[in-house]
Image: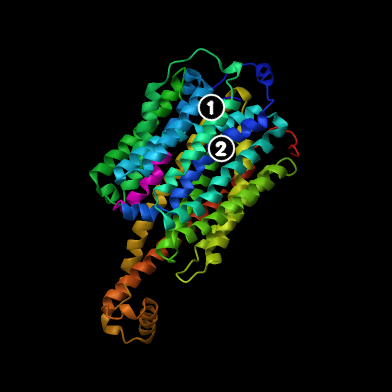
Amino acid sequence: MAAASKISTPVASLDSTPVTNKWLIAVAVMLATIMEVLDTTIANVALLHIRGSLSADVDEAAWVLTSYIVSNAIVIPLTGWCGSYFGRKRFFNFCILLFTFSSFMCGCSVNLPMLVFFRILQGAGGGALMPMSQAILMETFPPEEQATAMSVWGTGMMVGPVLGPIVGGWITDNYSWRWIFYINVPIGIIAFLMVAVFVADPGYLRRAVKRIDWWGLGYLALGIGTIQILLDKGERLDWFDSTAIKVMAVVGTFSIILFIFQELRTKEPIVDLSVLKNRTFAIGVTFMAIVMFGMYGTMVLIPLYCQTNAGYTPLLAGYVMTTQSLGSFLSIIVAGRLFNKIDPRYMIAAGCVVSGYGVWQMAHFDAQIGFWGIAGPGFLRGVGTGMIFIPMTTLSLSAVSREQMGTASGLFNMVRTVGGSVGIAILVAMLSSHSQIHQAYLNNDINPLTLGNWEQTQAVTGYLAQMGPGNHQMPLMAMLYQEIQHQASIMAFLDDFRIIAYIFFALTPVAFIMKRSKRIGPVSAH
């Protein structure tokens, strides 16, 4: 039961750790994980309402998601040091309380800067929850049950995405988007009480507290933060035509380089990069970062598409999102049971193909598409990523020694989180730029002198019929411009989906570069 920290302890001391209440411990840490994941997915379907309520553009509203994720990624490397200094149980419960308080304050926000600020605090509280809970399970359960433990943990993690979109859509439709944050309060209280009762600090974690690598932490925070701001504001500032973007690019790049140099030369790094010498783990970390690029991308793009182009309510968009999460939920259960019965690399490759095919179907959406036309491909994407998640996580973490498990888990989750944040920023920026590009091309195809053309006349007539009798007084060219904007938006979404599909297909053969760990035993039947 180790926090996400580097542990230099003989294996015998690990084996002597009591595991009497291992399933109660699993439930306790899963509640904390569910709370964190729930808040990410529950906010996706309410993003347009948050935007309207706080008078923000789509790219500005995306800060509500990316600010949380970036804060998450920066805090993750601190988890081990804080667990050692404050005590694993005390720090874990402090993070739960910080997350719960910040959730309440997010709901009380009166403007976008206030909401982003408390989302940053919320991310700081949630950053330690996932790696600590993951490391606790991996070291609480024996090697032959680790895949089952990861399956249970993954199943709990998917409860949030399954319930989040529906609950978020229903709350947004019937009450206010603010209640999507308030809902974390009772979950946080229950998680706090269960951790207080069932989780304990094992003896092998009691060691001398080392100094924290403040330079490494500073370079990491500056690098990730600067690059994320660059990606978020690049489209608005016209990218490298802006001096501010150029400065942020230079600062971000040099900060990351200095961070790597600092971590390689210091005796007590905040992120022990030496674990990346393990080829299987290094490939797994990179692989999951790219997978999260596509996974987080679809989780943001689909509810936006449903509400902006298909006319869905937040609740109906929530139902669409739930089908994705349901697909992941089912495939995670199956993947955990099949892990030791078939080569997990085949599951990962199959997951990439299924995910890629699902997203490729999304690249053929249109304005008249029905519910299952959107939900069906989303379900396939969910099934595919579920097939990837458990085998890849278990293969990656089982490839390192138990002494490095905490460090590996923290690094794995940090890079995975950054991948998702970068994915959201890049895809939302592309959405805006490609929409303008497509609109310019479509404008060139409309000539006011040739509106007598039969095909154009039919298109305009059909659009007028859809708009209803109350809009027939709108000038013809104004209605054409409105329709051009609509079609350009759809085409921009399809571009994003097409890129994500290519990414999943390209990842398929990479799975076979990894090696299967010999430490993994048969999966428990329970």
Q: Which residues are magenta?
A: 54-73
Q: State the image quarter where residue 485 is shown.
A: bottom left
- Magenta segment includes 439: no
- Tell me if I can see residue 119 in this picture: no
Give the residue number, with chain letter if any, for mark 1. 4
Count the marks.
Answer: 2
- For the point 53% across and 27% down, the residue is 4
Quadrant the C terminus occupies: top right
Say whether residue 57 is magenta: yes
Q: Would you name the residue on which mark 2 appears?
A: 31
Helix, strand or loop at mark 2: helix
Q: Is residue 129 above or below residue 511?
A: above
Left of 383 or right of it: where is 85?
A: left
Within-10-Å neighbours for mark 2: few <14, some 14–19, many 20+: many
Is residue 174 or residue 430 the one in the foreground? 174
Which residue is at 69% across, 25% downward? 20
Q: Which badge, 1 or 2, comes first in the chain's sequence?
A: 1
